[in-house]
Amino acid sequence: MAARLLLLTGLAVAASGSLCHRKPAASFEVENISSNPSTSDRPCIACTEDGYVALAWSDYATGHEEVWIVEKDKGGTWSSPYNLSKAGNINGSRGVSLCYSRDGTLHAAWSQLAPRGQTGAWTIVYTRRPPGGDWAVPETTWHGTAVLPHIGVDTSGTVHLEFENMSGGSSTICYASRAANGEWSPVQEVSAPYAATTGGIGVYDDGSAVVVWERWEGPGEFGSLLWSERTLAGAWSPPTLVDFPARYCLGPTTRGNGSEVALAFTASDTRRWLVVMTRPRHEQWSEPDTSFAGSYYGKPAVAVASAGAVILAWDAFSEPALRVARRDSTWSQLRVSDSLYPNIISVAVDADNRVHLAWSSQHPYPEPGDIYYAEIEAVDSTRR
């Protein structure tokens, strides 16, 4: 796999609220993962506790949109790109979501346009691969116009799938689960029909889960976030408003470590914020953390380390750069200055607190975008 390495220096800044405490500069590399003349987009990254990394994205390398994946061991080199979707001459393999089980099984789901009738139908395709094994025969979920999946897995091996049904011109947030024996549950509609978009799921080890989404209130009328909890009995609680005092709350993203779920979103009114909230299992959401108020942000990505540190990554539209932050008792921040024109971002963190960051960069037209990766050793927030 051709790869182009760019040297990069990040400015490390520690902060409590105002992000004003300076730290030693950190150096790392940015790697072009796709490095091809076709359009590469929509990355998703996941890692095991011991630092084995998988990175998947959508690419037109074959002339049709397929999901490709590369992997690498801790300190190793990337594997050759593997065509995971293998959809052939059908465009529409996109929106991939990855996660690992505690036993090292890699799970993947994506949106796939499948043959049906005269025009085809959007479905969710799921597959998995045990450590040292082969990818399983893909399994397909049919439910309206099914797109934009997010998956998580609990300690029993149950896979939890959230996706959008876009039938009727707007979306419904839906859920299904796959037991360790391979049996899929019926699809449940978590949100009100045709009244939601941009969902995300966080899964706890015991099989409970939370889903967060944007409420759709009519053409051009976005602005509120709702969430619902799945109990151990399998029922979903009534949708509840995410309480934050801003006119617009958009772009929710969720990720968990099994015992805690983190939620990040953007908010705006007269000011703009990045907002982070966390929710330990069976407890209430934390108070909103708005340490990043004051800049213009795109949709963030979030992850939670096994020890509880929150990792946040975002693009600041005022500059062609990414920023990455880690929160322990305070925030530490890095600026990824050679990230070109960052668009969709994905982040994961291993047990050694190394941050694995992937993003798509949209070059100036007509150049196609590429997928980039950086491994960032977490800033030591104990140093001052």
Image (spheres, rainbow, N blue to C red):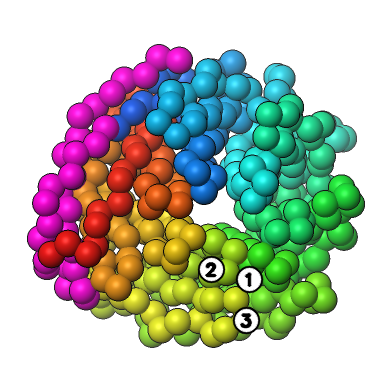
Q: Residues within 10 Å of mark 3 (few under 14, many from 20)?
A: few
Q: Earlier in the sequence, mark 2 or mark 1?
A: 1
Say left or right for 181 vs 202. Answer: right
Report the mark closest to the observer, 3 or 1.
3
Q: Report which quarter residue 114 is drawn in.
A: top right
Q: Report which quarter residue 5 is drawn in.
A: top left
Figure quadrant of the N terminus: top left
Magenta-highlighted residues = 1-29
Q: Where is residue 144 drawn, in percent x and y?
A: 79, 52
What distance separates the C-alpha of mark 3 from that of mark 1?
Answer: 10 Å
Of residues 84 and 71, the one drawn nearer to the viewer in this rendering: 71
Q: Is residue 24 magenta?
A: yes
**Helix or strand or loop: what does disc 1 sit on?**
strand
Q: Is residue 41 above or below residue 171?
A: above
- Whether pointer 2 and pointer 1 mark residues with C-beta atoms closer than 8 Å, the reply is yes
Say left or right for 123 vs 16. Answer: right
Q: Kindly identify which residue carries mark 3.
A: 282
